[in-house]
Image: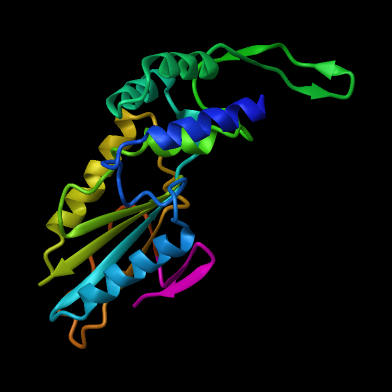
Amino acid sequence: MKCFERLVKSFITSSLPESLDPLQFAYRANRSTDDAIALTIHTALSHLDQRNTYVRMLFIDYSSAFNTIVPSKLVIKLRDLGLNSALCDWILNFLTGRPQAVWMGNITSSTLILNTGAPQGCVLSPLLYSLFTHDCVAIHSSNTIVKFADDTTVIGQITDGDETAYREEVENLTSWCQDNNLHLNVRKTKELIVDYRKQQREGHAPIAINRRVHTKYFAVFSAGT
């Protein structure tokens, strides 16, 4: 089955339009975590070079992201991307009506039929997830959303202390998650603020997540103030 999945994955990848979100760095040719890290750091530092600026970076964590994919919504998005209808129907069939049971010694649980999510360890699952979230993009030009599979980072480029666009971005992302059955893990979602201004006129008003003085991003440590 995995060999067939690899063939399907290769076909899907070759059929994707160039209009696909350029800030998704997973499962795209000539892209890697290094590119995601480089863009994130470059975006932040370029903004910090300007007067009276700082950066707020929100590192999103989802609860069981792959398990929450809604196949019917996924197929609609795949069709919107121009994928073959027959292929979309096959993917819908592949992701729905999946029997699941647990074995422990000589004991077997009752069988549960799953109609949401993508199977863990499946060749197609990471790619399907990245396509399911391809429409999660920034609504303000002063913000950037960088993605690598289910790792999502919101970069808010703040000027003159105006955080309106950043806060609207976070609210929009929250609404998008609700619409797409993704669950934000508030306990593991972290925020990093980088502010090198010598005179900080006021404290940074919090949003409802955990504030960090440093964080780990794809095995790279970043420090804020």
The image shows residue 2, relative to residue 57, as above or below, that is: above
Q: Is residue 6 above or below residue 38?
A: above
Is 212 on the left-hand or right-hand side of 199? right
Q: Please provide percent x and percent y for residue 73.
A: 35, 22
Q: Which residue is most to the right?
A: 106
Magenta residue span: 212-225
Residue in the image at 43% along x and 73% along y: 222
137 sits to left or right of 220: left
Between 187 and 113, the one nearer to me in the picture = 113
Q: Residue at x 36, y 37 (%)?
A: 133
Q: Which quarter shows the N terminus?
A: top right
Where 205 sits versus 160, above or below?
above
| Quadrant of res 129 | top left
- Side of 56 where 100 appears, left or right: right
Q: Check the image and name the residue furthest to the bottom.
A: 198
Horizontal and vertical percent for residue 124? 54, 32
Foreground pick, 158 / 35: 35
Front one among 151 and 32: 32
Q: Does residue 210 show up magenta in the picture?
A: no
